[in-house]
Amino acid sequence: MMKFKLVLLVILVGVISQVQASLIASNDDYLIIDNGDSYEGITIRDDAIVNMVGGTVDLGNASYMYDNCQFYISGGTISGKVYLYNNTQIILSGSDFYVGNVAVGLGELDLDYLVTVGALDYFQSEADTYSGTISGILFDGNSFTIDFRILQFIYGSEPETANITLVPEPVSMSLLGLGGIFVCRKKTKLHIT
């Protein structure tokens, strides 16, 4: 009987250790997700900032970001669906970004352009809602796919919206900077001679 209880306890501890915590950040929190961190579902709100440089985030079927928060993602493993609204922002650092099957450049995603080229679905509900799938390679070399919904509520004359911004990995930034210096230097030489 004692051996049976011990085996049951070992199985129970094993099952509990596999359960992942949900990430909740709010009220100006600043959190870093690093190697070894693992979350199932997120809620980021109220001016919180989360910086993901490693670890694992499974957004599941419905994670939420709202009320002026920011989520920086440059490494780790992330997948699932996230809802964004009320002036929130996801900043992805990497390369080879796609929304649906459409390759997209760097900077803030232009929702109107992406709807026009068929990369996003647009539907009307109590808010203007855009949905799509973004994929690419993060700065640490991990590929990712995130399903997203951006909800735009209009209160008064200004829409309360959210956005996704794509930035290059630091190596690409350095090469762009060196290229700019080279071009400026070459133009300076042309003016001197």
Image: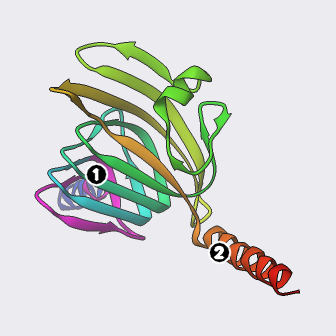
Determine if the magenta segment contains residue 112.
no
The local secondary structure at tag 1 comes to: loop
Can you give x and y, in whole percent of width and height, for residue 58 in the image? 39, 46
Determine if the magenta segment contains residue 18.
yes
Gap in Å between the C-alphas at discs 1 and 2? 45 Å
Residue 98 falls in image quadrant: top right
Kindly identify the residue that appears in the image at 32 percent across and 39 percent down: 162
Looking at the image, residue 127 sits to the left or right of residue 102; the answer is left
Can you give x and y, in whole percent of width and height, for residue 179 in the image? 74, 73
Instruction: Please tell me how crowded label 2 is: few (under 14), some (14-19), or many (20+) other residues with Cα within 10 Å.
Output: few
Under mark 1, the amino acid is: Val
Looking at the image, residue 78 sits to the left or right of residue 69; the answer is right
Q: Quarter of the image for the C terminus: give it.
A: bottom right
Looking at the image, residue 174 sits to the left or right of residue 163; the answer is right
Under mark 2, the amino acid is: Gly
The one nearer the camera, 47 or 190, is 190
* Image: magenta residue range: 15-42
Residue 177: numbered disc: 2
Residue 19: numbered disc: 1
- Can you say whether 51 is above or below 25 in the image? below
The local secondary structure at tag 2 comes to: helix
Residue 151 falls in image quadrant: top left
